[in-house]
Image: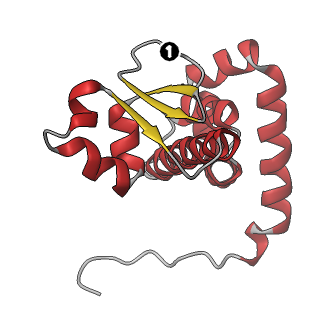
């Protein structure tokens, strides 16, 4: 996003070096740019600002770091949403997403789900397809769930089923 000039709508000039950026990202990431760009300022109208008192290399690092934090925050939020409501029918897709995002928390949640629901997951057509398309991922989650089941499940007390009225 930083190096792509595609759809960039604001230029920040630092020590003669031009940074083609996106207003929405600048406003979301910085109170300074938010104040500069929210009203009819000269910079907002021109789509350009020159910054003094900072080196181009330092500004480059700040922009890259800020974008990385925004992306990491979005990734964390998405994974938190994906951890809720795991079902047999969405297990395989969420497993592929956890692999793509390289998210250990989501992967561990799916391992725990598989350890508790393996018969239903294995009976699902999506699991059969996952084994064919992504055999290494299927093997990895099976090995992890096997370890999980052997080490953690024996210590979990089974819950008593309650009947209405008792």
Residue hosting label 1: 5
137 vs 58, left or right, is right
Residue 22 locus on image (x, y percent): 40, 29
38 vs 152, left or right, is left
Q: Quadrant of residue 8?
A: top left
Which residue extends farthest bottom? Answer: 166
Is residue 136 shown above or below 164? above
Is residue 158 shown above or below 71? below
13 vs 110, left or right, is left
Task: Identify which residue, 128 or 1, lies in the foreground.
Answer: 1
Quarter of the figure that contains the C terminus: bottom left
Q: Quadrant of residue 68?
A: top right
Residue 13 locus on image (x, y percent): 50, 32
Identify the coloring.
Answer: secondary structure
Question: For the point 77% across and 49% down, which residue is it?
Answer: 145
Is residue 4 shown above or below 21? above
Which residue extends farthest left? Answer: 40
Label 1, secondary structure: give it: loop
Task: Identify which residue, 115 or 48, lies in the foreground.
Answer: 48
Residue 130 locus on image (x, y percent): 68, 20
Quarter of the figure that contains the N terminus: top right
Mark 1: few/some/many CA within 10 Å (<14, 14-19, 20+) = few
15 vs 141, left or right, is left
Residue 107 locus on image (x, y percent): 68, 46
Is residue 39 shown above or below 137? below
Task: Identify which residue, 43 or 10, lies in the foreground.
Answer: 43
Question: For the point 83% across and 50% down, which residue is it?
Answer: 146
């Amino acid at each position: 996003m930083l190096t792509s000039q595609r759809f960039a709508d604001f230029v920040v000039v630092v020590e003669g070096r031009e940074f083609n950026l996106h207003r929405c990202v600048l406003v979301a990431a910085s109170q300074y740019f938010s104040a500069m760009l929210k009203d009819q300022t000269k910079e907002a109208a021109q789509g350009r600002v020159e910054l003094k008192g900072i080196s181009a290399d330092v500004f480059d690092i700040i922009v890259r770091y800020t974008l990385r934090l925004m992306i990491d925050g979005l990734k964390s939020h998405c994974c938190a949403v994906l951890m809720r409501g795991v079902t047999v029918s969405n297990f395989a897709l969420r497993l592929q997403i956890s692999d793509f995002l390289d998210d250990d928390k989501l992967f561990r949640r799916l391992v725990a789900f598989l350890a508790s629901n393996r018969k239903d997951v294995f009976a699902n057509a999506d699991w059969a397809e996952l084994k064919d398309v992504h055999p290494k991922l299927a093997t990895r989650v099976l090995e992890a769930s096997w370890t999980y089941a052997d080490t953690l499940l024996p210590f979990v007390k089974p819950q008593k089923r309650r009947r209405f009225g008792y």
